Image (tube, rainbow, N blue to C red):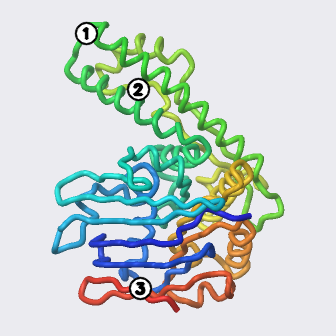
Amino acid sequence: MPGLHLSALTLSHFRSHKGLALALDERPVALFGPNGAGKTNILEAISLLSPGRGLRRAVADDLARRPERLGWRIDAMLEAQGQSREVALRAESGASRSVRIDGKAAPQAALGRIAPILWLVPSMDRLWTEAAEGRRRFLDRIAMGFDPAHAEASLRYDRAMRERNRLLRDEVRDDSWYMALETTMAASGQQITAARHAALARIAAAEDAASRFPVAGLTLTGGEAGALADLLAAGRARDMAAGRTLSGPHRADLTAVYRDKGVAAAQCSTGEQKALLISVVLATARALADGTGVAPLLLLDEVAAHLDAARRVALYDEISALGAQAWMTGTGAELFTDLGDRVQRFAVTETGGESRVEET
């Protein structure tokens, strides 16, 4: 099955890359080189082709190459089902990011309609044991792939909640100031929760019992959405005492269970937790491919380093079967030997703070 893929990627003054121009085909991409060479910076640039702040959640100014700090540019050509879309991202020094799609200015949310992107980075290895916020972001990125409107609903909800929290901190007691905000939060919250549940159902339907990766039973808990306007109105005094909103989908959590063992993901070994994450990403990619006919872009940072040989081969085989352009990083070329000619290989090195990339 053909997937979404980048046929060209150009970076200018982005992180450690003063200049980078890659010509690509639809195959997966392996980036290998020593730690600190700039491999993850390339994945981060690609992650910004979707709504949000990318896989490191960095602000625009932090992405500019030092010491020049001239701002940065990302240009990409996305290909899917015979169609090409040109995406250009810009950020001048001290300015926020701008987006152009096919030469026309566009909001960030529009990226979600042309570039479903999933990523897995080492910091997510602790996803099942750390705070719920990271799990919500993980689920919301998945939900956005299935329903691009999820990004807009989340933005509306967050804007209204920030304004409500400001009123709470200022101890504003006039009900009329709250009603419109709570109505917006209730409508957007219902949409957010519905999209999350729909995404989980799609993932469950796409799970593959024959996969070498364990099936993860996922459940959404908390974060009341039904009658949320009433809950918010009734909880104003409590929320004012706390200085923030204590009800709504921003309080939800995603739980996972290693289904065959009946063990919560948080209680599994480190290796099992990683395998469960990979399983969820692969099931999501299968579900997206089944639903749209196009596999998403996958960004898998250091994914092979902590897999045994059998699971590494299984991962590569599943990516190839999907037809996904997976961007994978590793310290050595030997990590990708099992992919044979199914992968494009690039060596990444760094000298004097500047990254260089060479196809091998």
Question: Quarter of the image holding residue 289?
Answer: bottom right
Element type at marker 2? Answer: loop
Q: Mark 3: few, some, or many residues within 10 Å (few <14, many ≥20)?
A: many
- In the rendered image, the quadrant that contains the N terminus is bottom right
Q: Mark 2: few, some, or many residues within 10 Å (few <14, many ≥20)?
A: some
Task: State the residue at coordinates (24%, 66%).
Answer: 64
Element type at marker 3? Answer: strand
Residue 100, image x and y in percent? 37, 53
Element type at marker 1? Answer: loop
Task: State the residue at coordinates (43%, 16%).
Answer: 183
Residue identifier under label 1: 173
First in sequence: mark 1 or mark 2?
A: 1
Type of the residue with mark 2: Leu
Task: Kindly report the distance in space between the C-alpha atoms of the residues bearing marks 1 and 2.
Answer: 17 Å
Does residue 178 sit above or below 288 in this rendering?
Answer: above
Residue 128, image x and y in percent? 55, 53
Residue 27, image x and y in percent? 63, 75
Task: State the residue at coordinates (71%, 51%).
Answer: 287
Assess whether mark 1 and mark 3 are in contact (beta carbons under 8 angstroms). Answer: no
Task: State the residue at coordinates (30%, 7%).
Answer: 176
Residue identifier under label 3: 357
Type of the residue with mark 3: Val
Assess whether mark 2 and mark 3 are in contact (beta carbons under 8 angstroms). Answer: no
Q: Mark 1: few, some, or many residues within 10 Å (few <14, many ≥20)?
A: few
Type of the residue with mark 1: Arg
Asked if residue 277 can be seen in this view, the reply is no
Task: Kindly report the distance in space between the C-alpha atoms of the residues bearing marks 3 and 1.
Answer: 59 Å
Identify the disc placed on residue 246.
2
